[in-house]
Image (cartoon, rainbow, N blue to C red):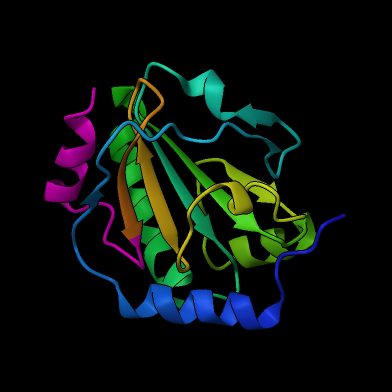
Amino acid sequence: MKIFHGTLVALLLILAGSTQAAGTLTPISGDVQAPDFSLQDTNGKTHRLSDYRGKPVIINFWTTWCPPCREELPSMNRAWHQLKQEGIAMLAINMGEDEDTIFIFSADYPTDFPILMDQAGEVIEQWPVKGLPTTYVVAPDGTIAYRAIGSREWDDKTLLDMVRALK
């Protein structure tokens, strides 16, 4: 089992994510295909990114011990309640923690969208994550359209309209 690059790298990711928080999404130029993955959620259901082809997907990389991650989760949940009927998917990929840790955390930060577990850190290594949280918006054709490093207010209309425009 491959362990994520260590505590020092994880702390650097946190610091990078917390210092770059802004209110917008950064467009990704070119035809960058989102790396496919297959991960289980906290209920044991397997999710493959390729299963969501044809719709925009918001993919958030996070951990329970990351303050900016905790800061943005409530707004992500509010955004999910706005988007779920619009054919837009939202997935949060937890980096390196087990189901029990996530379950205890969810008592204080409940979410209604799928929380996926990347316990070995294999998926996060395939994505160009530069800080925590990092969120990608994948277009219906499977390309990465936007990236957000650091926390956002995900229920902000301007931000959601950028995602909606991908439909």
**Residue lying at 32% horizontally and 31% vertically, measured from the top left:** 31
Asked if residue 64 lies left or right of residue 149, the reply is right
Which quadrant does the C terminus fall into? top left
Q: Residue furthest right?
A: 1
* As drawn, 41 above or below 23: above
**Residue lying at 23% horizontally and 53% vertically, measured from the top left:** 26
**Residue lying at 60% horizontally and 53% vertically, measured from the top left:** 124
* As drawn, 78 above or below 63: above
Magenta range is 149-167
Q: Quadrant of residue 56?
A: top left
Q: Is residue 162 magenta?
A: yes
* As drawn, 21 above or below 118: below
Which quadrant does the N terminus fall into? bottom right
Asked if residue 32 lies left or right of residue 34, the reply is left
Q: Picture coordinates of residue 54 (x, y %)?
A: 38, 16
Q: Picture coordinates of residue 79 (x, y %)?
A: 31, 46
Asked if residue 115 lies left or right of residue 111, the reply is right
Q: Nearer the viewer, residue 61 or 153?
A: 61
Q: Picture coordinates of residue 156 (x, y %)?
A: 18, 53
